[in-house]
Amino acid sequence: MVKDLLQGKRILVTGAASGIGLGAADFFTRCGAQVLAADRDIKTLSAVWQHHGKVQTRALDVVDEAQCEDTVALMVKTLGGLDGVFNSAGISDAVVPAIEVDIAHWQRVVDVNLRGTFLVARAAARYMLRERQGSIVVISSVNGILGIPRRHAYGPAKAAIAQLARTLACEWGTSNIRVNALAPTYINTPMIERLATEGKIDIDRLQRRTPLGRLGEVEDVARAAAFLLSEWSEFITGVTLPVDGGWLAYGGPGDVATA
């Protein structure tokens, strides 16, 4: 049953103050896990989790190497170990034409998404390699698989994350450490709401373009992540699993509904 899927697992979740990270951390606890929820926004993080008995919190800027190492050390000390990582920390880009991209912002998006994913995974692996077990799930995107205009930092960073999952899976597999990526489509989160409010995406159009006819929900991603963190997926590593309602499968012109 779902309530036992992650029973006894100790899982680190980054980006856990909002969006996919928040929803996933909550779902993991309902599956029986103990969670260390980490986020750069410690004020929001603490407010969200202050009354949740199965969740501890920690301030973490994933681009800071020392903070990543210290967070894993704290988790091992307080929870007695580390069985899984869900690296959800990430930021969106400016969604502007390439010639208008601010290179400092471009670098920040790449750093948070790609560098942060690597640093968290590497910090976790230092412990997991000694224990010869563990599962790491990282977040790529359909933006990292398809060419989408005006996503000049986010898309390439997410593509690199999928490749990173493959290389780490091959390197750490003999130590029974699995590394997989999820590639969500547009998920109903505050980030998507902001982009819609700014007029940078059209939610109705996105829904018409998706074979299942809706945006993804946070729990859609959380369920897939829980599967990859559990023993149900113990012979799966190095994959990028779309969580996209059929977005990548559809190749016709125009909206699915009128195809």
Image (cartoon, grey):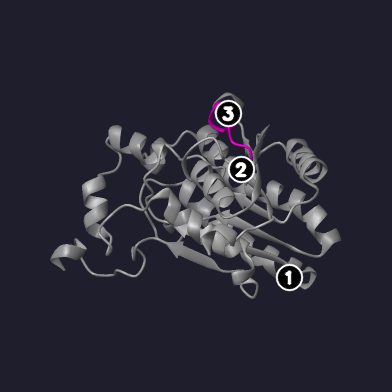
Check disc 2 and give the amino acid type: Thr
Question: Is label 2 in a helix, a strand or a loop?
Answer: strand
Q: Residue 41 carries which label?
A: 3
The x, y position of residue 144, in whole percent, is: 47, 57
Residue lying farthest to the top in this orientation: 43
Residue lying farthest to the right in this orientation: 130
- Can residue 250 be seen in the rendering of this structure? yes
Mark 2 burial class by Cα count in 10 Å: few <14, some 14-19, many 20+: many
In this view of the protein, which residue sits in the foreground, 96 or 179?
179
Q: Is residue 89 above or below residue 205?
A: above
Q: Distance between the residues labelled 1 and 2?
A: 23 Å
Check disc 1 and give the amino acid type: Gly
Of the residues under marks 2 and 3, which one precedes in the sequence?
Answer: 2
- Does the magenta-highlighted stretch encompass residue 66? no
- Residue matched to label 2: 14
The x, y position of residue 209, in whole percent, is: 25, 59
In this view of the protein, which residue sits in the foreground, 58 or 240?
58
Q: Distance between the residues labelled 2 and 3?
A: 11 Å
Q: What stretch is highlighted in magenta?
A: 45-53
Q: Do the residues labelled 1 and 3 touch (CB within 8 Å)?
A: no
